[in-house]
Image (cartoon, rainbow, N blue to C red):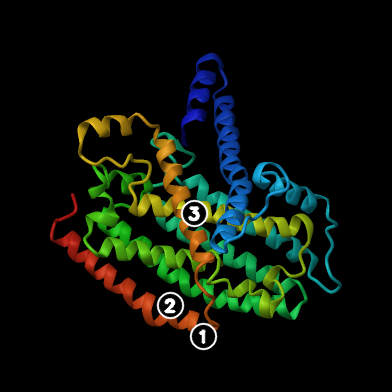
Amino acid sequence: MTFGISNFVGDFVREYSPLPELALAVNVILAIIAVLAVGIGSAPILIYMERKVCAHVQCRLGPMRLGWHGVIQTVADVTKLLFKEVYSPKGVDVIIYYLAPMISLTAPFFVLALIPFGANWQVINLDFAVPAIIAINGLGLFAVLLGGWSSNNKYSLLSALRSGAQMISYEISLALIMLFVVLISGSASLNEIVASQSGTILDWWIIKMPVLGLVGFAVFMCASTAELNRAPFDIAEAEQELTAGYHTEYTGTAFAMFYLTEYINIIGASALGAIFFLGGWSAPLIGIEAIDNVLTKIPDLVWMFAKIYFLIWMFMMFRWTWLRPRVDQLMAFEWKFLLPLNLILLGGGALFSALGWVL
């Protein structure tokens, strides 16, 4: 583990305690607290942010009554969900019904544990982090399928089947674009991918690879939106024809788990986008010494979260700008456009690497 605060406390405990197990326990506990803080602590901010982004796109105010500009509206909503009755409809598979939201909420925390939020702010540093993240993403699909199937509701079942088709299809493009980044950076480690972009903003992969970098970033954002089940790719939760989709029969905290999963997932997807294409926690240096000296004094954690929230804002703008396509159009877009484009990107990345342009 390479989490900064836990290392500091762990070293302190190791020095003054004869029990190395105690130092390990401190590291583990602090790492868990850090991951939970990033995920659960960011969710209320993102819910409020989404409401305000939606409101301004649609030329309205959004929440305004509870607190300054409605800042505690989310607190009221969370309180309501916590105190609502949790029940299951007649005929459900009770064990799987309640297991599904737990699986759904577990997967994004695994991803957050692998993400380096700074040079010394990471829980687990894996050399094969990218393949691990691709594997973990499959748990989200598994949870949706279980939740829809176990609910004993035809709308939930239809939503689960839609999700199976959509998420499996777009996971292919998402995996390929991640492999594209691995190919051009020469490593599957997230830290090494960030290191391959050291320098100025011209060394970020979105710029460093002419045209292909920008196209790869666009494909990543598109595939991630579909993987997140967010509009305009939210056919699994299409309220117009499926009531609420796979979580139609969920209430209270069980529904809150599915709801929370979406916002933790968007943090993970935005963090990966920042690492793959925007230099990760690196400062946006421009090559002018006087300015770069000021930028480098800002902590790397601040730069990382600034990039994360910028990408989150982009995800939100996608949601409230584009219309939802039909199911057949969505699937055709993946198989007839994104997948061939990803294969072209892989070919271009291989050529880029073979010619020795990657430094």
Rendered location of residue 14, percent (x, y) = 51, 20
Instruction: Please state which amino acid type lies under the numbered disc 3.
Output: Ile
Find residue 247 and report its horizontal and vertical position in percent: 71, 67
Mark 2 falls on what kind of element?
A: helix
Residue pictured at 62% horizontal, 78% vertical: 161
Nearer to us: label 1 or label 3: 3
**Residue closest to the eye, 168 or 236:** 236
The residue beneath circle 1 is: 328
Residue 322 percent coordinates (x, y): 50, 71
Residue 296 circle label = none
Q: Which of the marked residues, 1 or 3, is nearer the chain's N terminus?
A: 3
Residue on which the image places disc 2: 334
Task: Quote the CA–CA distance across marks 2 and 3.
Answer: 22 Å
Pick the front one: 267 or 93: 267
Q: Which residue is mark 3?
A: 312
> Is 338 placed left or right of 206 in the picture?
right
Q: Residue at x 33, y 39 (%)?
A: 283
First in sequence: mark 2 vs mark 3: 3
Instruction: Give me the C-alpha separation between circle 2 and circle 1.
Output: 10 Å
Q: Position of residue 230 (x, y in %)?
A: 55, 66
Between 214 and 344, which is closer to the camera in this rendering? Answer: 214
Q: Nearer the viewer, mark 2 or mark 3?
A: 3
Q: Quadrant of residue 246?
A: bottom right
Q: Which residue appears farthest toward the bottom when viewing the image?
A: 328
Residue 170 located left or right of residue 93: left
Q: Amino acid at mark 1?
A: Asp
Q: Residues within 10 Å of mark 2 (few under 14, many from 20)?
A: many
Left or right: residue 153 compared with residue 171: right
- The mark that comes first in sequence, 2 or 1, is 1
Question: What amino acid type is highlighted by mark number 2?
Answer: Glu
| SS at badge 3 | helix
| Element on which disc 1 rests | helix
